[in-house]
Image: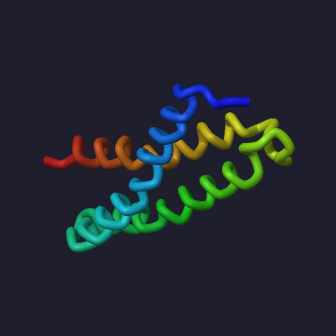
Amino acid sequence: MSIAPAVIIHGLAFFGTCLPLPSVYALSALHLGKERNWRGFATYMAALPAFVFFLFLVFGAFGNEADDPLLFISGLLQRLLLVVAFSWITFTGLRLLRQP
């Protein structure tokens, strides 16, 4: 059975997007930790990579193949991973909108 090129491109785009994000979180946390009004947000940014990696491992190890035990909720796991991984954009934007 061959894999369609679109499936390969989709998978590579997913990895190319989600794998660099934890470094963005860490660098942001380091920078924001120096700002007095952003220290609480920096803590959130510092904790985010661990949670994203955890969801990534759960999805990859238990919900990705046909015989995996969490396959029946693999779509939900993937959406949860994406919501958590990209939540920093929304939270950062909301914080910036509240700045004078």
Above or below: residue 25 compared with residue 82: below
Residue at the left extreme? Answer: 100
Image check: 71 left or right of 56?
A: right
Q: Which residue does the image show at 68% across and 37% down from the upper left?
A: 76
Q: Which residue does the image show at 59% across and 37% down from the upper left?
A: 79
Residue 66 position, x and y percent, is 82, 39
Image check: 94 left or right of 6?
A: left
Residue 12 position, x and y percent, is 48, 41
Image check: 80 left or right of 17?
A: right
Residue at the front extreme? Answer: 1
- Quadrant of the snapshot with the N terminus: top right
Q: How is the image coloured?
A: rainbow
Residue 64 position, x and y percent, is 72, 44
Location of residue 63 (image quadrant) = top right
Q: Which residue does the image show at 49% across and 47% down from the upper left?
A: 15
Above or below: residue 64 compared with residue 37: above
Location of residue 32 (image quadrant) = bottom left
The front one of 38 and 9 is 9
Above or below: residue 13 compared with residue 44: above
The front one of 82 and 90 is 82
Image check: 23 left or right of 1?
A: left
For the image, the number of numbered tags is 0
Residue 2 position, x and y percent, is 67, 30
Q: Which residue does the image show at 23% across and 46% down from the upper left?
A: 96
The front one of 95 and 9 is 9
Location of residue 57 (image quadrant) = bottom right
